[in-house]
Image: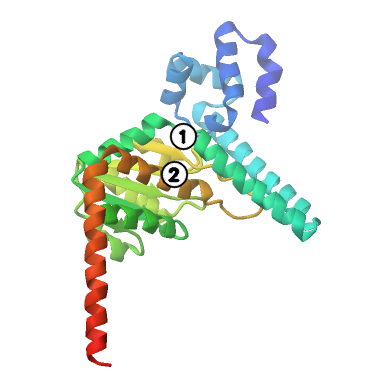
């Protein structure tokens, strides 16, 4: 393992290499998904020093070094899931429920605890500044995306455009995205190819891409304008959605708090129009009874 190899060589390293090694060991799970430029800035060394360190560790360069760590992290996740599955399988139903509930509470607590307030504030500000808001979700994430979409539409805050379904379904809508617009992307493993395509296209058009996901493993992570990480610890071969749903709710409430008068007025109008529509339908039904 790369981690073990670094530890074994710590004693023989120069001070500069030792500094790099300590940082990598302390942030190991993220290193495999961090570019050489990002990592060198975080540590405070040059790109060349970082590359020389990986060569000292007997890799051809940083790319090979990073890929080796990626493989280790993926394998660890797979093994942890298999162990948890075997342990749960032998427990009585009441204990299974207890373990599963505890895990979801952990996911929720960790997600909310790790929220970066500045990141959410940036998203809220951009929502008010943007001309149009695009929201994307595929697979199960589509359902969470639709909750968010419905809430924003109800607020009458902006033009809201949902991006989901097949390419032929969403392409005519996505085609109008431009600089100054924002795209929210919600995706969990296996990361949807459509979600990656949508985010890449939006970024290329100059729009801000705001990502809700679980890990730097997500291919969109590296170029998103802002990321909210949703804890996705699983005891089985499934994703956890409680963190993502909670983040959506928090963001909706922050939008309300930042523009209570305007948004509440819009929501009140929607409710009044809805009541009028139901009354109209009732009258029409009564006429034919």
Q: Which residue is mark 1?
A: 115
Image location (x, y in percent) of residue 134: 28, 51
Image location (x, y in percent) of residue 41: 42, 19
Find out whether the residues at labels 1 and 2 contact each other: C-beta distance under 8 Å: yes
Q: In the rendered image, which quarter is residue 60 located in? A: top right
State left or right for residue 74 relative to residue 43.
Answer: right
Up the image or down, 115 lies above or below 83; here it is above
Q: In the rendered image, which quarter is residue 169 located in? A: bottom left
> In terms of depth relative to the viewer, which is nearer, 253 or 29?
253
> In terms of depth relative to the viewer, which is nearer, 194 or 165?
165
Q: In the rendered image, which quarter is residue 269 located in? A: bottom left
State left or right for residue 71 relative to residue 184.
Answer: right
Up the image or down, 223 lies above or below 170; here it is above
Marks 1/2: CA distance? Answer: 9 Å
State left or right for residue 84 relative to residue 229.
Answer: right
Element class at badge 2:
helix
Q: How has the structure been colored for display?
A: rainbow
Badge 1 or badge 2: first in the primary sequence:
1
Category of crowding for the residue at label 1, using alpha-carbon neighbours closer than 10 angstroms: few (below 14), some (14–19), many (at least 20): some
Up the image or down, 171 lies above or below 105; here it is below
Q: Residue furthest top?
A: 15
Rendered residue at 44%/44% (across/down): 247
Up the image or down, 162 lies above or below 247; here it is below
Checking the image for residue 247, the label placed there is 2
> In terms of depth relative to the viewer, which is nearer, 39 or 86?
86
Element class at badge 1:
loop
Checking the image for residue 144, the label placed there is none
Rendered residue at 42%/47% (across/down): 249
Rendered residue at 27%/44% (across/down): 182
Rendered residue at 27%/52% (across/down): 155
């Amino acid at each position: 393992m790369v981690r073990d190899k670094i530890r074994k060589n710590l004693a023989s390293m120069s001070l500069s290499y030792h500094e790099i090694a300590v940082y990598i060991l302390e942030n190991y799970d993220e290193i495999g998904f961090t570019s050489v430029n990002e990592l060198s800035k975080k540590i405070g060394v040059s790109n060349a020093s970082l590359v020389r360190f990986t060569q000292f560790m007997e890799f051809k360069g940083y790319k090979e070094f990073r890929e080796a760590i990626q493989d280790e992290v993926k394998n660890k996740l797979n093994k942890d899931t298999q162990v948890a599955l075997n342990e749960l399988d032998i427990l009585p139903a009441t204990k299974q429920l207890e373990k599963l509930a505890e895990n979801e509470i952990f996911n929720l607590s960790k997600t909310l605890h790790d929220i970066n307030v500045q990141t959410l504030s940036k998203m809220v500000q951009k929502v008010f500044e943007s001309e149009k808001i695009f929201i994307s979700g595929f697979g199960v994430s589509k359902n969470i995306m639709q909750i968010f979409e419905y809430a924003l539409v109800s607020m009458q805050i902006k033009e809201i455009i949902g991006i989901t379904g097949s390419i032929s379904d969403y392409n005519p809508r996505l085609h109008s995205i431009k600089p100054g617009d924002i795209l929210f992307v919600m995706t969990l493993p296996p990361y949807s190819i459509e979600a990656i395509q949508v985010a890449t296209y939006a970024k290329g058009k100059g729009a801000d891409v705001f990502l809700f996901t679980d890990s730097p493993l997500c291919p969109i992570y590296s170029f998103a304008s802002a990321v909210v990480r949703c804890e996705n610890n699983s005891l089985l071969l499934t994703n956890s959605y409680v963190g993502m749903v909670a983040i959506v709710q928090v963001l909706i409430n922050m939008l309300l708090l930042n523009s209570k008068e305007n948004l509440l007025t819009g929501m009140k109008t929607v409710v009044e129009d809805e009541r009028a529509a139901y009354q109209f339908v009732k009258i029409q039904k009564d006429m034919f009874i």
